[in-house]
Amino acid sequence: MHQRALRTVLLIQAIEETDRTGEVIPLADRAEASRAAVRESALPRGAQSGAALSRESERFLARRAEHLLERLRTRSPAVTHILAVAGGITWLGRFVLLLALAAGVSLSALDGSRRINILAFPLIGLLAWNLFVYAMLFVGWLRTLRHRRGPMGFWSARAYERWIGGRIEALMRRSTRYNVPLTTGLRRFAAQWVGISQPLLLLQAKRLLHLAAALVAIGLIAGLYVRGIALRYEAGWESTFLGPGSAHEIVATLYGPAAALSGIPYGSVEDMRALRWTATGGGGEAASWIHLIAITAALYIVAPRLLAALAAMLSIWKFSRRPPVPPALLGYARALVMGVGSGTTTEVARVTPYAYEPKADSVAGLESLLAAALGANLKVQMGTPVRYGDESAVARDQAEKPATWNVLLMTLASTPEVENHGAFIAGWRDWLLKNASSAPLLILIDEGPYAARMRGEAALEQRVQERRRLWQEFVAGYGLRACFADLIQIKPGAASEINARESARAALWIAGERA
């Protein structure tokens, strides 16, 4: 799914799941959009894979979201601006490019004279800065290879990302004044999209900065040529510490490649002596030196920066074609697809309790929750509870009983321990990573037993919150998220089920994807 389509689908999902009464997007509009999307795109005949969406389902979701977005735009024009800003389209980029070009032109006349010092700023300064940036990019590339991290950026790239986030927040504050329900969905969309699109925003920032650096050099070249046509320039050099021999060595190093490419000589030591400005004279004709400066800037600044910008554009293109689909979208998508009659094959969600034996009421609530979160066409397979000390048997059971979805069920009444709960969670996570499994993993913490045990205490809610925070931090230590629900209280269609469904979708994890 292209990133533009995914962005629209996630926006509609966020609004639909927070606008339960249909105040922002009427329920009738949703049903009509589904029917229209079915007419325009073929739905998959078989069941969906647990960890991926088929091309047909992606097209269905995209077309449905487009229909709903068209109607939403007429009621809430701010949505159009938020989508545009979320994609990185702002006036900031155009302003930075224009500013860079103007800065380059200004550098050509920085000292206000008609002299070009061939050993001084602005060319030397620009070259030094760009060489420093190239070195930093090389160091960052080595760190990426060593630690296998995603795209990295300088503070300027991070600032660009924060700018986008600030623009979205400002637009949402404006929409709050007239549509609070819409803002709730927009905030949820923004939080989710920023996490997904962070690599894209950093790549866009890199492209912008490389283009800006190239335009500074182009502006310098253009400024020198324009002023050289209208005014008479002279070129030379002056220094307290350098002699003609040292100046010639620097000139040979700096302008040598440009001279070799163009055939324009930079002169001998005697020529350097003649170009030296003194109290009695010095300097010479500047046309050839303007040519050498232009070629040098093109070689060291313009060409490398444009190549780097091209590389960033290729990375943007690759990312935009297939951005990572958040696990939270899978259940939503499956529910929509099956709601219009697609898929008849039953999928299996294997539930493995750890140090916990859920009662019948809890199992019924669990089945209702998983059906709401992962799709109604789902068979819940309860596994034998794993006891303390049996964590090593996890890998064997996984290989013998593959499932479409994996659910680890634990209880809030237990205090998480690294050697027990940690080993169990890590065993599942590592096995899925090692075998490149695409079956999503959900860690579900049942609050029911703990709430029942503490019922009647005045500080019940506080104790539950403390224990929940303890489990959140514990599970996060393994790069995962936990879903909390009182399974006994889960009833089909009730608010408890809807809230737990959203929490479960947000906590889904797929091996190889960022948590």
Image: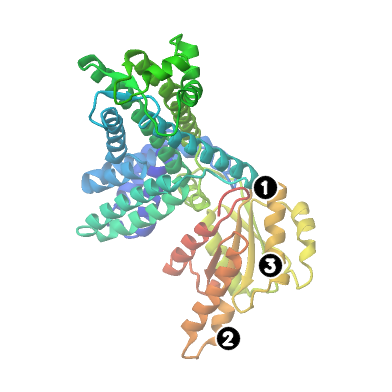
Q: Regarding mark 2 in the picture, which secondary structure is present there?
A: helix
- Give how far across and how far down residue 352 sits, in percent: 68, 64
Residue 453 marker: 2
Mark 3 or mark 2: name the one nearer the start of the chain. Answer: 3
Identify the residue shown where x is 49% and y is 40%.
323
Which residue has dot 1 on it? 437
For badge 1, the amino acid type reads Ser
User: Which mark is nearer the camera, 1 or 2?
Assistant: 1
Mark 1 or mark 3: name the one nearer the start of the chain. Answer: 3
Quadrant for residue 183, please give it.
bottom left
For badge 2, the amino acid type reads Arg
- Give how far across and how far down residue 133 sits, in percent: 47, 38
Q: Residues within 10 Å of mark 1 (few under 14, many from 20)?
A: some
Q: Say if 417 sits above or below 206 in the image.
A: below
Quadrant for residue 431, please give it.
bottom right
Q: Could you tell me how far apart the alpha carbons at marks 1 and 3 are, in whole angstroms?
A: 20 Å
Q: Say if 318 sits above or below 431 in the image.
A: above
User: Which mark is nearer the camera, 1 or 3?
Assistant: 3
Mark 1 or mark 2: name the one nearer the start of the chain. Answer: 1
Q: Could you tell me how far apart the alpha carbons at marks 3 and 2 are, in whole angstroms?
A: 24 Å
Q: Say if 195 sits above or below 109 in the image.
A: below
Q: Is residue 475 at least partly visible in the picture?
A: yes
